Image (cartoon, helix red, strand yellow):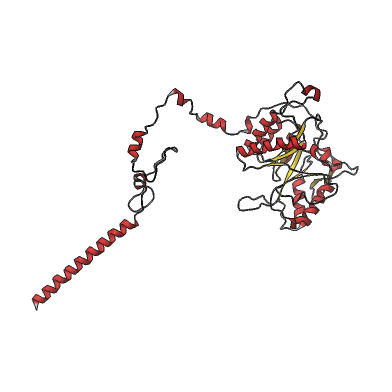
Amino acid sequence: MAKNLEKYDKLVIVVIIIISLVLGVGYWFAQQKSEPVYLSKIDRLMFDKNNKSPAYVLTLPDKLEFSQNSEESTDDFFEKNPEPTRTEENLELSFSLEDLINKVPNVGKLPNKSYHIEMKNQDILPNLTEILPNNMILPKKGNDGRRPWIEYGYTVNTLPNFKKIAIIICNLGFDPMPINKISSAFPPELSVSFHPYLTNAQNHLTTARSKGHETYMDAPLASHDFTKEDTGPLALNFNEEYDENLSRLHKIIAQPGAIGGIIIRDGAVSPQDEPVLKMLLEDIRNRGLLMIDATLSNVISDIKIDNLARRKADILITKDMSSDEIDEQIKKAENMAFDKGQVLIITDDKPLTIIKLYDWIQSFSPQLSYEESKAVDITKPFALVPASNLVVE
């Protein structure tokens, strides 16, 4: 009996050993299968055995490319491709931090110029002003028929053989530096427009108008996607009633300085919004203001309002455009000016755009009479004019 028990004990031990071996081999294969497939030795270096966060971070030059099918090791690669020795020739190709900073568009580097022009009306005129019971000051058409968009603007005479270019830089007012530099550097024929949330509005308007620039206000539409861009509580939102939108419009134009009109900026608008839009445009007309449509659609342009001073922007340069795209828009503006004789450009206050427009304006040919121009090669017969000069009621 004891011998039989001893036999069973040995058998149990053998079975336990076999089961342990099977489990051990199975666990080893499972570990091998779950381990990530490394494309190279660099990948294997970066991760530990438990596939946790990188243990090392290796940064390779951008121009080094390794084929996934290559059997060449990284050591062999660097032996065949040693780092080039710096010479005077390739040192010239490098640049310093100062060079890099100098390449960043900076409106503050625009020159200060002295332009001599006196606007007919730099400040608001009492007879073109309506004071509401809540002390809100609104522009209005005068009893004598005078309109703010004309009285607060001015006309520039251009020679017949020159094409008219009007530029309005919008969204100004968040930072006083750009408006100060723009007012000083650009010719007075440039027009400016301020966002509706600006502080120190009187100072901004006075600064711009003292340099001869026509002044307007941005009237943003509600954003297409408020999760990406919020145009704020004063944006015209056609999900709201007419009275609410009229209140927002009045808050935008209630400024302590002379403004000639509004720039309606792109946003959510559809043909179904025409009833509310039409009443808002009628209020703008009744106040003698200029309305410039700077939207990407034709919804506003298609609304007919008698005797409304209006203009549709020909070129829109948005803040998300690249350098090449801005150049394309400027070239498009030139072609349009040659074709139609005039062009209206609306742009945001992006430094790169401002500098490109400044350089472009400097390239305009000087205005010469037809006879004088015969002896001169005039490549860009463009004349910068205030925005109001392109408007006909």
Q: Residue at x 70, y 37 (%)?
A: 333
Front-lying residue, 330 or 209: 330
Quadrant of res 115:
top right
Residue 361 in view of the camera = yes
Q: Residue at x 74, y 50 (%)?
A: 298
Residue sitting farthest toward the right:
144
Front-lying residue, 225 or 366: 366
Percent x, y of residue 89: 46, 24
**In the displayed structure image, the side of residue 10 where residue 283 appears, left or right:** right
Percent x, y of residue 60: 41, 39
Residue 166 in view of the camera = no
Count the numbered circles shown: 0
Residue sitting farthest toward the top:
375
Percent x, y of residue 339: 75, 37
Quadrant containing the N terminus is bottom left
Percent x, y of residue 25: 25, 61
Q: Residue at x 69, y 38 (%)?
A: 332
Front-lying residue, 293 or 123: 293
Q: Is residue 270 above or below residue 314?
A: below
Quadrant of res 245:
bottom right
Quadrant containing the C terminus is top right
**In the displayed structure image, the side of residue 46 where residue 299 appears, left or right:** right
Q: Residue at x 64, y 50 (%)?
A: 230
